[in-house]
Amino acid sequence: MLLSSGSTRKASLYTSFLQLGEAFLRHEKLERVKTPKETFFSRPLYLQLLASAMVVLPVLVQAPWVRLYPYSACLFTLCLLSLGILIGEIWDEKLSPAGPLLIGVSGSWFCGCLFWGWLREYPIWHLPVESLALPIALIGLRTRWRVGAAFYLACLLGTALTDLMMLLTGVMVQWPLVVNAPLSEAPKLLYEAANQLLDPLSIALLLSAAVLIMLIARAMRLKASLDAYLRETWMVASSALTTTLLIDGLFLITALIQPQLSGLI
């Protein structure tokens, strides 16, 4: 009887250990499903650099391209969109979130081509045209393409603040004159427009906008550190917004020092 009772206890203990092990394995499997796999571009530094590069790209490539060949520049949107979908669907495990980010870039690229290719002398249409993809981006925030949507929305926010500052400082009035002027006169007009931003009131407005952008970007980075599920989304938005501020500053410096190198003329 004692032997039988001991064997029963051992069997019961062994069964309990098996059940505990199975529960542990099920828990580990569930956690692996819930936790996104880290990829090369999901690492904070590389993701921020990639997002920033996608903001700089239009300044270096799109601006001169769309001014000379607007139709081909506009059609290049299909290349960006196709590549983004291809990466997102086929190589998502290795390159995520590069695919969704390219889709967001394609939205900004297309809207930028429409404005700078055909409506560049009408600054009042800048923000409305850049906002054409806004409904799609808002829907995209609820999908697995949310990184691209966040990129587009952050760039749009930066554009809105830039246009607001141009309006408040009076530079927007000079915009049509600069873009319609002959190449021999445009640099001088651009310099004069940029020089308007050096008065105390304009400087105060620009600094206020810069501080606001930095605070918003900082809040986004904080959200990224607190929300693992949306970390990539907030990081991309923060980097895109911060880079937009840097590009605006670089544009102002270029307009004051070498206006002929500006992408506006």
Image: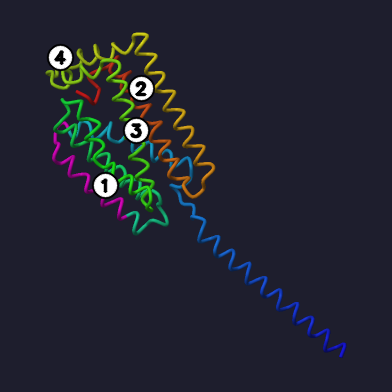
Q: Residue 161: where, in percent of width, then height?
A: 33, 27
User: Is residue 70 inside the magenta stretch?
Assistant: yes
Q: Which residues are magenta?
A: 67-86
- Residue drawn at 23 percent across, 40 percent down: 132
Q: Earlier in the sequence, mark 4 or mark 3?
A: 3
User: Helix or strand or loop: what does disc 3 sit on?
Assistant: helix
User: Helix or strand or loop: what does disc 2 sit on?
Assistant: helix
Mark 2 and mark 1 residues within 8 Å of each other at the beta carbon: no
User: Helix or strand or loop: what does disc 4 sit on?
Assistant: loop
The rendered magenta stretch, by its main secondary structure, is classed as: helix
Q: Residue 103: where, in percent of width, then height?
A: 30, 47
- Residue drawn at 17 percent across, 44 percent down: 75
Q: Earlier in the sequence, mark 1 or mark 4?
A: 1
The coloring applied to the image is rainbow
For disc 3, the marked residue is 157
Q: Earlier in the sequence, mark 3 or mark 2?
A: 3
Q: Residues within 10 Å of mark 2 (few under 14, many from 20)?
A: some
For disc 4, the marked residue is 185
User: Is residue 99 inside the magenta stretch?
Assistant: no
**Left or right: residue 254 compared with residue 189:** right
Q: Earlier in the sequence, mark 2 or mark 4?
A: 4
Q: CA distance from mark 2 to mark 4?
A: 23 Å
Mark 2 and mark 4 residues within 8 Å of each other at the beta carbon: no
- Residue drawn at 30 percent across, 54 percent down: 85
Q: Residues within 10 Å of mark 4 (few under 14, many from 20)?
A: few
**What amino acid is found at the position of numbered circle 1 in the picture?**
Leu
Q: Foreground mark, 2 or 4? A: 2
For disc 1, the marked residue is 80
Q: CA distance from mark 2 to mark 1?
A: 27 Å
Relative vertical location of residue 146 with respect to residue 115 in this rendering, above or below = below
